[in-house]
Amino acid sequence: MELQKVQNKVDDWIKEHGVRYFDELTNMAQLSEEVGEVARIISRRYGEQSEKESDKSKDLGEELADVIFVVLCLANQTGVNLQKAFDKKMQLKSKRDHERHKNNPKLE
C-alpha cells in the first residue's frame, strides 16, 4: 500500500473514531511512549535483559504498528507527504551509501 493511502486511512479513522487529532506535542509524547514499548520488547526478547513473564505476551508487530500509526498522525497534522519524503530519502541514501556499507569492515 502506498504511504499516501495509509495516511488517508489514518485520517479517515481519526475523523470517524477519534474526534480530532491530539496536538503535535501530545502525539510526540505518544510516539516516544510507543517507541519505548518496542525497545522494551526488543531489549528483553533479543537483548541481554531477561524477559518478565508479563512481557512475554507482548506483540512486537502490534507495538511497531502503534509507532507507524502515530508517525502517520504526525505527518497528517503537519502536512507532510510521507510518500514524497520517503522516496526522496531512499534516493539520498542510495546515492550516499551505495558503497559505504559494502566497504565497512565492521559489517563483514
Image (spheres, rainbow, N blue to C red):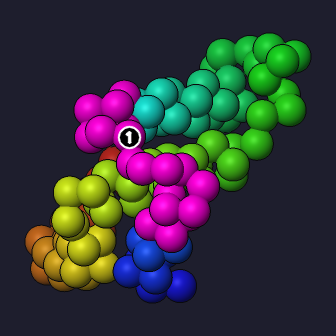
Q: Is residue 65 magenta?
A: no
Quarter of the figure with residue 50: top right
User: Magenta part mainly helix, strand or loop?
Assistant: helix
Q: Is residue 90 above or below residue 39?
A: below
Magenta-highlighted residues:
10-29
What residue is shown at x 58% (from left), y 30% (from top)?
Answer: 37
Query: Would residue 16 appear left or right of 68 to someone viewing this image?
Result: right
Query: Would residue 79 appear left or right of 9 to someone viewing this image?
Result: left
What residue is shown at x 31% (from left), y 62% (from top)?
Answer: 76
Q: Quadrant of the C terminus?
A: bottom left
Q: Is residue 20 magenta?
A: yes
**Which of 18/106 is in front?**
18
The amino acid pointed to by label 1 is Phe
Q: Is residue 78 above or below residue 90?
A: above
**Which of 69/15 is in front?**
15
Task: Note whether residue 99 is visible.
Answer: no
Q: Is residue 74 above or below residue 97?
A: above
Residue 81 coordinates in the image, percent (x, y): 24, 74
Residue 40 coordinates in the image, percent (x, y): 60, 25
What residue is shown at x 51% (from left), y 35% (from top)?
Answer: 34
**Which of 90/103 is in front?**
90
Count of residue discs: 1
The residue carrying mark 1 is 22
Q: Secondary structure at mark 1?
A: loop
Residue 15 coordinates in the image, percent (x, y): 49, 62
Task: Estimate how packed mark 1 is, as few (under 14), some (14 to 19) or many (20 or more) residues with alpha carbons within 10 Å.
Answer: some
Task: Note whether residue 69 is visible.
Answer: yes
What residue is shown at x 51% (from left), y 70% (from top)?
Answer: 12
Residue 14 coordinates in the image, percent (x, y): 50, 58
